[in-house]
Amino acid sequence: MSAVLAPRFDEAPLLDVRGLRVSFGSHAAVRGVDFQVAPGETLALVGESGCGKSTTAMAILRLLPDHAKASGHVLFGGRDLLALPEPALRGIRGNEISMIFQEPMTSLNPVLTIGEQIGEVLRRHQGLDRWQARARAIELLDRVRIPHAARRVDDYPHHLSGGQRQRVMIAIAVACQPKLLIADEPTTALDVTIQAQILELLRQLGEEFSMGLLLITHDLGVVGQWADRVSVMYGGEVLESASTERIFSAPGHAYTRGLLGASLRLDSNVFYRNTELPEVRVRADATTGERSFQLETRPAPEAREARVVTPDTAPLLSVQDLRTVYKTARGDVAAVDGVSFDIRPGETLGLVGESGCGKSTLSKTLLRLVDPSAGRIVLEGTDIASLPPRQLRAHRHRIQMVFQDPYGSLNPRHRVGDILESALRVNGVPDATERRRRVADILDRVGLPAASVDRYPHEFSGGQRQRIGLARTLVLRPSLVICDEPVSSLDVSVRAQILNLLVELKQAFDLSYLFISHDLSVVKYMADRVLVMNGGRIVERSDDQHDLWTAPRDPYTQTLIRAVPSPRFAPPPDDAVEPPATVEPVAEVAPSFLMWRFAV
Amino acid sequence: MNDVSLSPASPWRRLLATLVAWRRPFVRALPTAFGVVVLNFVLLQAIPGDAVDALVAEAGSATAETTALLRQRYGLDKPPVAQLGDYLGHLAHFSLGYSPRYDMPVMDLILARLPNTLLLMSMALGIALSLGVSFGVVMATWNGRWPDRVLSSIAFLLYSTPGFWIGLMAIILFAVQLGWLPSGGDATIGAELAGWAKFGDTLKHAVLPAFTLATFYIAVYARLTRAAMLDVRTQDYVRTARAKGLHPVRVTLRHVLRNALLPLTTVAGAHIGGLLGGAAVAETVFSWPGIGRLTLEAVQAREYRVLLGVLLLSSFLVILANVLVDLLHARLDPRIKGN
Amino acid sequence: MPPTTVLPAPEGTLAPPTWRGQLQSSLLGSRAAPDTPPAPVVHTSRLRDRWPTTAALLRLPGAVIGLLLLAVIVGIALTAGVFFPGDPLDIVGQPLLRPGEDAAFLLGTDHLGRDIAAGLAHGARVSLLVGLTAAGVGVTVGTLIGATAGYFGGKVDAVLTWLIEVFQTTPSFLLVVVIVSITQSSLEVISVVIGLTTWETVARLIRAQFRALLSSDFVLAARSIGFGHRWLIFREILPNALPPVVVTASVMVAGAILMESSLAFLGVGDANKVSWGSMIGGGRDMLRTAWYLTVIPGLALIVTVFSLNLIGDALIEAMNPRLRGGAR
């Protein structure tokens, strides 16, 4: 593992945040946050969405929208940034403190060249003229490893990929050699291989310029590999602050324990057939307003035996030489280029690949939402690849899909009950009473209240919507369910619940899964066998003899596995994740604020 | 996604791409132009009675044979598709027919009046863009405060008021009460002016009609600029600009406005058609001798050929304007292919 | 166990990808964006949860004022026959009475001796009739063409887009003038013709919506469940494509009213009906002396169009929370 520059804890802190509070109108997003960043150190602010970490980061440089109110102290170089007059603050932004953001695709001005955008910050703070700025910009592009920098400097952002745009953002940020770099989820929108490169680049630049780094992230793996110290946030507060080593080996707060327990790591040995993921529940006391965090692990896995799968069982799904070709302006593109695999009844086949590898086209082809150009899809004995639409309808219910985005996969104009009942009606259940009974039954199975039938999707949270999506998938009693990134848009804690639910439903309904994800740890947990997809082809597959995870053969698989951030410290032994005997209240909580319950 | 990117081509390929880009909007406009011609032809066929009926009516009466002979002579007894061919042939020779009332070819008639309307439209567009965009920038910058509220209310009123009414009110105020500007026509009657003096006189007469024509579009551009700027302000790249420590004025002009103007160019092409329609009204109110007023005269005199000639040429004008706007847009927005 | 409050977590998700987030917030006008906490499901009023757009709309002052004004105009139009029986074109009094001069004619009379107030009331009827009919025709035709083009794509789309472009290129007002003078200038014809020359805005909008929604996950899910074309078009896509059309419809009504008044002003309108535009046109020659002939009907026009635009603007704001300057 790469060594991190030794932070200088004996010197005065670079950034000292005390009692920071931010509110948007009546909603308090940040409620008294304290942390420090030492010169040259990497501090990670970790938490799930809505915890206020991004708001905290933006508050430091006062980049929040006008209606946000911030109070407290942010001390930097002997001055309180929150009290500084605007012109002085502008002199610090981009100069002594820089910031990079989450979405590289939209963070650059589309009508200016990247040279102009890098040069802008140099001309502002260092008074360079156009030509000096351009020359320096080329140097910086070189430094952030953009090839052919002298040519690319006149490119527009849309000529660059996401990873390259993030490098340009980094170039802009380090142009004036700031003392502190704030990185707000810098790699969340990037593929895992690119993520590794970007984080490595940040570390090198940090060393070169003796820069402190405030890293905002939700990914514990990233934290474990790259951060010196960690502050864990929830609900606008810092729950725990410690060195990375301490957090990972002996987490103090129940929430931290829950997060660590619920996150999957490539080097752990949990597998869905023998371990259930612990779920974090937050309970708010209605009278006192106190919060309590509880870790729940459910009973032992004997009860979770799914159907035993033997190698000579006839496959449920057999895909043979499948090809799907898109016609684009630049010619034909084979998004799926000769893919073959089998899925046996009762098994979960995992499919791993980065964006653009063709996995979403593959799932759409299997569902016949897109027509294949060649090949066969044999589902329970019938080749559905070439069936005309009318005959296809009879087979559609056998293979269904759970979608990634809980916000986009439900029609906002339909009530939950209508969504489920209409699916049944069009698939041959004419009796209304029978339909209602089945709808009520499936809602119960996925853990939603019966009153949900009258509600619209926007009245539910993301995790609940994913459960509705599951209900819609299962109400038709399919044999095979394609799970296309079903938990990628969900927070870590919610992820555990949905994954546990998926396993439970698989056994209850006797299903088989095709589990697609870019997240290797999740696939390792959920899948019996794994396929690795790249460029429309299967480059490697695991089977009973060959374990992909320990001995990958294909170079792409090896790169992929190596790129997954792995904490430098060993995970706590399993018994350390046992729930405490009593429910732990959190001290000193303002009784008036609105509680967010975690269980979904 | 592989970390691959597209590099812009070498200078030669860039030149070729630019030429191709220039040709593309023209080529794309051809089917529309054809459609417009067909539409006009269909309307032409829908006219009750045809040219021969008009001739016969003028002459008093005629026998059935004479009428038939005349039809044959003018090619009016052929099947519609053949007549369409004839029509296209006439168009290719820049002929739109003949107007008995004005005793000149329709094309000449229209071309004589067209420059006046173009003058009015360009003045109106210039006023609308400069005032509208400026107002929009002010409204967006002081969003929610009193300059925004005041200007928004004014813009809203202008947007809701019919142009001809504003023109009449303008006449009452500026011509009748204040006497600053003439109330109609395009030249002072009796004064034999030439050169710059004449130009100045024409401009003086054009001010009120141009402003009347512009009012609606001032409101449209102000609101559009305001909405576009407010939307662009929430974009990530504006946040990046602020994080660089740039001065707010620089952020507004270089980052926000430049991007906010892009949707404006998209919309401007569609407004040429509206300006032509508005010109018909403004020219009537101010007795300005352009093709708008010609349209009205033609309606009253039942000169259908002139009417359809105006319609066809106006549509072609709109097509041309759209092509120019497309090219302008491609220059301004590097994301459009060909740049 | 201490009693607990059951609350749904607002997040559980990372920020949704941009187009979905925008679609979601523009469709629902909802507070369901990930960063804001929702109110507990149990305790809020059903209106705010079930119909967030309508609730947001009714909270905007612009919408309330606009709806009230429009209600007044509609009221006048409906009761025109009661308060002003008979034909407003009848000569009923001395010509050129100023407003307030004669108690019987509160708003005065025109150059022929016709009652201006009667003209206003009946003119309201004309304007609203033309506005609603034209917008109705335009929205219907536009939706049919736009939906067909957007849903089926391919050659159908190419042909229909060509048609849309042809109509978009031809200046609407001139086209109406031409068609009306070729056929006849009765009110019914005018309304329909205005509708037939302004449908292309709606068609483009609906086509764009359909194309975007076709690739949305919930439509893909519906297809994978086995729904047919008719269900997909009418039950899945169209309800989500309509909100921007509602805004456009109010603007179209306003535009149609303005167009009809321009036609009437120029003398191309229905000669047998009194319209605000014809009143202004009639009073044009007497601008210097009897300016009220022009001003009063003009004000009526302004108020009507103003109220419609207020409603349209309020609808846009209610449907898109981002323009309200909310938290990112």
Image (cartoon, rainbow, N blue to C red):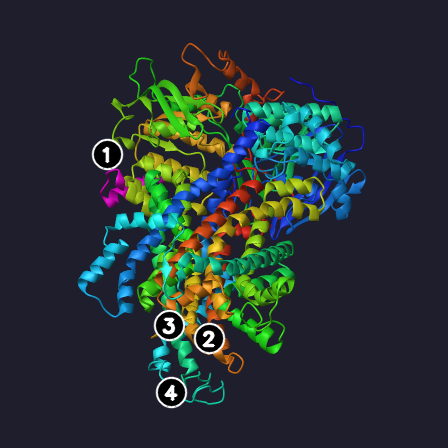
Relative image position of residue B328 (x, y in whole percent): 55, 44
The reply to whether residue A286 is visible in this rendering is no
Which residue is at the front of the view, A381 or B151?
B151
First in sequence: mark 4 vs mark 3: 4
- Above-or-below relation of B193 to B137: below
Foreground mark, 4 or 3, reads 4
Q: Check if mark 3 and mark 2 are on a common chain.
A: yes
Residue A160 falls within the magenta-colored stretch: no
State how far apart marks 4 and 1 are (Cα).
71 Å
Name the residue that disc number 4 marks. C92
Residue A298 vs residue A41: left or right? left
Chain identifier of the residue bearing label 4 in the image = C
Q: Are marks 4 and 1 in contact (CB under 8 Å)?
A: no
State how far apart marks 1 and 2 are (Cα).
61 Å
Chain identifier of the residue bearing label 3 in the image = C
Relative image position of residue A247 (x, y in whole percent): 64, 27
First in sequence: mark 3 vs mark 2: 3
Name the residue that disc number 3 marks. C125
Name the residue that disc number 2 marks. C297
Foreground mark, 1 or 3, reads 3
Q: Secondary structure at mark 2?
A: helix
Q: Which mark is residue C169?
A: none
Name the residue that disc number 1 marks. A390
Residue at 48% across / 38% down in the picture? Answer: B23
